[in-house]
Image (cartoon, grey):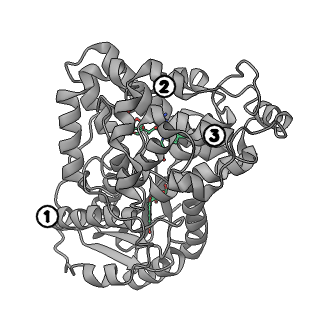
Amino acid sequence: MHDVRGAVVYWMSRDQRVRNNWALLFAHRKAESLQQPLVVVFTLAPSFLGAPLRHYDFMLKGLQEVELSLRELNIPFFLLQGEPETELSGFIKKLKAGAVVTDFSPLHISRTWKKTIGKTLLPIPLYEIDAHNIVPCWIASGKQEFAARTFRPKITSLLKEFLTEFPRLTPLDSVQEIIPVAWDKIYKGLNADQNVQPVEWLKPGEKAAEAYLDNFLCNRLASYSVKRNDPNAGALSNLSPYLHFGQISAQSCALRASGSNAPETDSSAFLEELIVRRELSDNYCNYNGFYDSFDGLPAWAKETLEQHRTDKREYLYTSEEFEEGATHEKLWNAAQLELVKTGKIHGYMRMYWAKKILEWSETPRQAFDTAIALNDRYALDGRDPNGYTGVAWSIGGLHDRAWFERSVYGKIRYMNASGCARKFDVKRYIAQFEREELFPS
Ligand code: FAD
Ligand code: FO1
C-alpha cells in the first residue's frame, strides 16, 4: 500500500472520542510523517439498524464534544449526513486526501461500508485500526472461539504487549480553516423514531464518561465481585453506553481498574467482563457471519431447541406483549420496564429476561429475533456485539455448556424467578419499575 500525497482523513465511526483512540493516534502520526494536514470526519447514516432518537441524541451530544476537543488540537471535524458510501467518497475526492484511516467494527453494516468505500478510494489506502479492543480482534484469535475458557489464555498472554498507556495527542501546527458543524441542521435532518425518548440519568460524552469511571472506581469497584448480581445494589459501572459509542476507551478503563487500590477479587472480576467477555463478543461477531441470527448458534443448541420446539408452552406472548411488559410474571415485566425506561437492564436480569422470552415464545427462532429487536430498540448499549452475543448465550447456549434437559429449553441453561429471589430482593426491584408509571392506562 502506498500513501498518495494529500491530507490524512480519520473516518471516525465506532470509537467516537479524542482521548486514548488508537485510530486517531495512527492518523495523527501519519499526517505528521507525511507533513500533511489531518481532518476527522463522521458519516451520519439516515438510519442505523433502526436506532431511535434515544441513541442518536446520546451519540450526537458526544460528537459535539468531539468537535470541540479536536478544535483545541487544531484538527477540523466534519459531519456528513447521508449514506456513508456516497457521502464519504465525494468528501475524500474534494479534499484530495492521500490516506484514510478508520476504526474497526465486526458488524455487517460497518464491513459493508468499508468494502464499498475501500474500492472506490483506490489507489488511496484505507487503514483499519482496532481502537475498541485492547488486543486487536484478529490478533487475539484467528477463529471463532468455543468459550471464554478457550479465549481467556490467548488474550491474557497478549495483555503484556497491548495493555499499555496511550501516547498524548499533541496539537498539529498546520493551522487550517475550521468550519463549525451546523448541528441544528443535522438535528432537523434526523428521521429517528421519537417514540424512544433520550434518557435523563446518563449524561453523554467523553467528559461524563471519565467522571462516571472515576465514580465507579472510587465508590463501587470494591464491592463489584460480591454485589454485581444484585440489581438493587447499584454495583455495576454503567459504562456500557459509553463503551458502545466509543466515548471511553476500554483500554483506559482496564488500566485504571488494574491500577486502583480495590481488592484483587473485585478488579479481576471487573476485568474478566471488560476484557475477556467483551472481546469474546467481538470475536463471535467477527468470525460468525450469522451473529445476529438464530442460524449462528452452536449446532448442539439448535438441535436441542429443535427437539423441544413442539413442547407445550405454558405461556405464549407476542413481541408486542413482551414490549409492553404485559406478561404474567411481575419480575419479567419489571426488567422490560427497566429497559424501556432507563435504556439498560441490569446484567443479571438481562440473562433471565432473554431466557423467559425463549420460554414464552412460539419458537426459539422467534424468541431470538424478539430479544434482539427489543434490546436494539431500547438499550442505549444495544446494536453492539455484546448484545448479539448476550442473546445468543441466553437463548442459544453460545459460549455455554449443555445443562440438565428440560421442556422447551432442552439443554439450554435454565433461569427462573425463584432463582432470582435466592440472589436478591425481587420485591424491591419490581417496586422500582411499576407498569403504571410507563404505560398510564
Ligand atoms: P459492568 O458489569 O460494569 O461491566 C463493565 C463492562 O464489561 C460492560 O460495559 C461491558 O462492556 C463488559 N461486559 C460486562 N458483562 C458482559 C457480558 N456478559 N458480555 C460482554 N461484555 C460484558 N452488553 C452491551 O454492551 N450491549 C448490549 O446490548 C448487551 N445486551 C445483552 C443482552 C443479554 C441477553 C445479555 C445476557 C447480556 C447483554 N450484554 C450487553 C452484556 C452485559 O449484560 C452488559 O455489557 C452489562 O450489563 C453492561 O452494564 P455495565 O457496563 O454496568 O456492566
Ligand atoms: N456509526 C456511524 O459511523 N454512523 C452512524 O450514523 C451511526 C449511527 C448509530 C446509531 C446508533 C448506534 O447505537 C450506533 C451508531 N453508530 C454509527 C456507531 C456504531 O456503534 C458503530 O459504528 C457500529 O456499531 C459498528 O460497531
**Front of the two marks 2 and 1:** 2
Decide: few, some or many residues near mark 2? Use Cα within 10 Å; few <14, some 14-19, many ≥20. Answer: some
For the residues bearing labels 2 and 1, Cβ distance under 8 angstroms: no
Q: Amino acid at mark 1?
A: Glu
Q: Position of residue 103 (x, y in %)?
A: 44, 55
Residue that carries the numbered disc 3 in the rendered image: 392
Residue found 77% across the figure and 29% down from its top:
407
Res 274 seen here = yes
Q: Secondary structure at mark 1?
A: helix
Residue found 47% across the figure and 83% down from its top:
90
Of residue 180 and residue 394, the one placed in the foreground of this image is 394
Residue 235 horizontal side relative to residue 130, left or right: left
Residue found 40% across the figure and 75% down from its top:
97
Up/down of 54 relative to 269, above or below: below
Residue found 30% across the figure and 85% down from its top:
185
Q: Position of residue 438 (x, y in %)?
A: 38, 57
Up/down of 366 relative to 391, above or below: below
Q: Amino acid at mark 2?
A: Cys
Residue that carries the numbered disc 1 in the rendered image: 72
Residue that carries the numbered disc 2 in the rendered image: 420
Decide: few, some or many residues near mark 1? Use Cα within 10 Å; few <14, some 14-19, many ≥20. Answer: few
**Front of the two marks 1 and 3:** 3
Residue 239 horizontal side relative to residue 169, left or right: right
Quarter of image, ligand 2: bottom left
